[in-house]
Image (cartoon, rainbow, N blue to C red):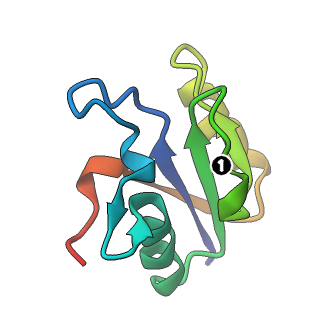
Amino acid sequence: MSFGAVILAGGQSSRMGQDKAFVMLHGKYLLQAQIEIVRAAGFSEILISGRPGVDYSAFGLPVLLDHAQVRRAKFRQRLRHGRAGNLFRLHGNKCPPL
């Protein structure tokens, strides 16, 4: 059985005042640390759910633009048509400690 992961990185980070995905933690972006955790866990497909207007190309993964009104529909569509048979969502503020 294969599993895919969607890392939710499209939040506004309004309380923090800066995009959490691009906060440096131990010499790497928080989003990069999450990607490494998901890869190490063996997920076969990894997607970033990101905010429109933000460049996530440095991470080398497909990006689903996070328009709040269609987010769930996109997850369901990706689950039905993606390579992975199951989908795991990783929330940015739920990252395990490094």
Task: Give me the residue at 36% from left, 53% from top.
Answer: 23
Looking at this view, is 28 or 52 the one in front?
Answer: 28
- Amino acid bearing label 1: Tyr
Q: Is residue 30 visible?
A: yes
Quarter holding the C terminus is bottom left
Residue 18 position, x and y percent, is 35, 35
Whether residue 81 sits left or right of residue 7 in the image: it is: right
Any part of residue 85 in sight: no
Quarter of the figure with residue 75: top right
Vertical arrangement, residue 56 with respect to residue 38, above or below: above
| Above/below status of 13 relative to 9 | above
The front one of 27 and 4 is 27
Where's residue 12, x and y in %? 39, 26
Residue 69 point in image, percent of width and height: 55, 13
Q: Residue at x 30, y 76 (%)?
A: 26
Viewer-nearest residue: 27 or 1: 27
Residue 41 placement: quadrant? bottom left
Left/right of residue 83 with respect to residue 11 in the rendered view: right
Figure disc tally: 1
Indicate the position of residue 81 as horizontal and vertical percent values: 79, 49
**Residue at mark 1:** 56
Q: Residue at x 49, y 77 (%)?
A: 36
